Image: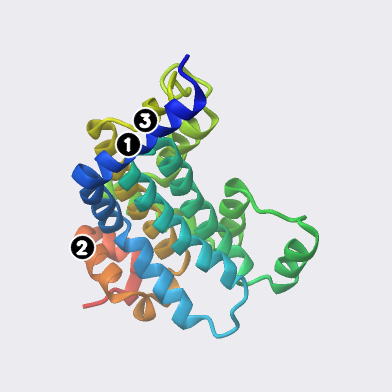
Amino acid sequence: MKPFNVQRDELLAAINARAASVGTDCGMNASKASRKLLCWQHYFRKQDDSKIAAELLAGTRAAMLETATYLTLGLGRAALMAMRTEVDLFLSYTYFRDHPAEWTQLKETGNGFMLREAIYRYHECMSPRFKERLAILEQAFKLCLIDVYRILSAHIHGQSAMTAPAAGMMTDLVVSQPFAESIIELQRQCAETTSNFLFAVYAEQWPSLPEEILIEILDKLSPKQQTAFFGEKKKQ
């Protein structure tokens, strides 16, 4: 095993070399892949005058920046962890923005975190059509948020031969370009499925939702799916 200082210097050299070659493109492509999430982040920031749980919105933006930065440096596992944070914060925001007392309790005591399953149950209870609408979008886009989340969680928990950390030296932490590209694709899927979740949650407010997202969804849904999703409110 090489001494720590030697490994550190080699790692910094590897990161610098990557950032100077393919790293910048990876970071930019990761930012582009998260476009839908950024669109929603801007939308909520402008819409929510109460600023309840605004820290979660700021956190989503920071997590997107972390993902792009880590990929620029070639730190793949760190990028995956930041990516799941994007999802967790967006989903949590959809609950806490409507629950100021619970948000205050969480900030003051650290108690009351909402896990993904609980947030799903909450929206299913509050909006009987949420589950149906989300299923329509996931069928149209052929992509499911739960599946994407499961992949991210598998990498974070690392409890399989495919996802367990395998670095022997510090330089091994700098991922290969094919792996980096697979992470960028996962970021695109993460953004798309989270966006669909948000659209399903707030479907009743569709005329005021981000126009860019609405146009893409209308283009993706068949006429039959549009009718099932929007009912008589379908945008002409």
The residue identified by callout 3 is: 10
Question: Residue farthest to the bottom?
Answer: 49
Amino acid of disc 3: Glu
Amino acid of disc 1: Ala
The Cα atoms of the two marked residues, 1 and 3, are separated by 5 Å
x 37%, y 75%: residue: 209
x 28%, y 51%: residue: 27
Q: Nearer the viewer, mark 3 or mark 2?
A: 3
Q: Residues within 10 Å of mark 3 (few under 14, many from 20)?
A: some
Is 111 in front, or is 13? 13
The Cα atoms of the two marked residues, 3 and 2, are separated by 57 Å
Q: Is the Cβ of the residue at disc 1 closer than 8 Å to that at disc 3?
A: yes
Please say whether residue 185 is visible from this viewpoint: no
Amino acid of disc 2: Pro
Q: Relative to 224, say whether 143 is above or below.
A: above
Q: Secondary structure at mark 1?
A: helix
Q: Quadrant of the C terminus?
A: bottom left
Is 142 in front, or is 129? 142
Residue 21, quarter of picture: top left
Query: Disc number at residue 13?
Result: 1
Q: Relative to 64, say whether 207 is above or below.
A: below
74 on left or right of 112: left
x 65%, y 53%: residue: 114
* Whole-percent x, y for residue 210 in the image: 33, 74
217 on left or right of 107: left
* Whole-percent x, y for residue 124 in the image: 56, 56
Please tell me which of labels 3 and 2 falls first in the chain. Answer: 3
The residue identified by callout 2 is: 223
